[in-house]
Image (cartoon, rainbow, N blue to C red):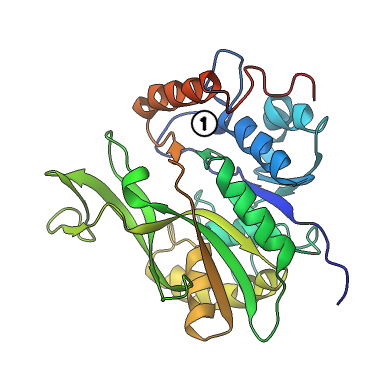
Amino acid sequence: MRKMNKPVLVIMAAGMGSRYGGLKQIDPVDNEGHIIMDFSMFDAKRAGFEKVIFIIKKENEADFKEAVGDRMAKYMEVSYAYQELSNIPEGFEVPEGRVKPWGTAHAVLSCIDQIDGPFAVINADDYYGQEAFRLIYDYLSAHQDDDKYRYTMVGYHLGNTVTDNGHVARGICDMNADGELVSIHERTRIEKRDGGIAFTEDDGETWIFVPADTTVSMNMWGFTRSILKEIKEGFPAFLEKGLKENPMKCEYFLPAVVSSLVEKDQASVAVLKSADKWYGVTYKEDKPVVVAALQKMKDDGLYPAHLWEGK
């Protein structure tokens, strides 16, 4: 067996923060000036990750380096990939007036020249918890593709991932008896309603209730390099359809690529369960909740007050 490269962490930080003004990834969440990403990096480093690739927008590079990258470079090997709207296959054109990026699968594709082994993918502005990074690092260190692509994801209880302040998008997961992903359905509007949690696909005309212990994906994935080839090969077909149906807003989502590989039996995805509560700032009003939760974790000794001091 050839020696495996150590898993690398990929952080998707190109999002424009459409629902929450400003570069939301760069908003401090404690008195020490840390941002959510500091906690993710701290947990990742503690789990064993040594290298991080930030996917950013080229025009945010200076701000991003000042707020995050330069500081992190002291503790981990840091590199950058740029998610550019113009990065599409030959024969396609960006619709005039489109500003929305092409989605999470396209974001990951921008790292194709920088990844040569297993890697984990996370959102920049979500708090995943210490256990999640440990689980995913250990899995990636111990598995490689055989007769199937061997991927993984960290699943959370839906009830641990909804907000009181509006709706969220979540990938709802079905698993088999072995805890492997059978399918994942991106529900773009899920919210708390009438004592439960429900989603709508017709702008609120009808609502379908979902149990709080349903497993959902928060975009914490573990892949081998093979996913990059698959994303690249699937992109033209996505554009063919998407540019006809919804040219300004269609997005190439990571879960859709994974689902299709699972359905074709080319990939298995081990769902690692985290009991940690997920935290994120979808809306400005979510921020105090996150600040209080992280402070409590510090008070309980899960994190030092100053994350990087003494490192």
Picture quadrant of residue 187 = bottom left
Q: Residues within 10 Å of mark 1 (few under 14, many from 20)?
A: many
Q: Is residue 215 depicted above or below 43 in this figure?
A: below
The reply to whether residue 308 is in sight is: yes
Q: Is residue 177 depicted above or below 129 in this figure?
A: below
The reply to whether residue 91 is in sight is: no
Residue type, numbered disc 1: Lys
Q: Is residue 131 depicted above or below 254 in this figure?
A: above
Residue occupying the point 79% across, 46% down: 51
Quarter of the image with the N terminus in it? bottom right
The residue at the far right in this view is: 2
Q: Is residue 36 found left or right of 1 in the rendered image?
A: left
Picture quadrant of residue 40 = top right
Residue occupying the point 57% across, 45% down: 131
Image coordinates of residue 160 in percent, x first then y, are 36, 44
Q: Is residue 184 found left or right of 302 in the rendered image?
A: left
Quarter of the image with the C terminus in it? top right
Foreground residue among 252 and 50: 50
Element on which disc 1 rests: helix
Foreground residue among 247 and 310: 310
Image coordinates of residue 85 in percent, x first then y, are 60, 54
Residue occupying the point 51% across, 26% down: 297
- Provide the residue designation for mark 1: 24
Residue occupying the point 45% across, 29% down: 21
Image coordinates of residue 264 in percent, x first then y, are 51, 86
The residue at the far front in this view is: 300
Image coordinates of residue 201 in percent, x first then y, are 24, 61
Q: How many numbered marks, from 0 up?
A: 1
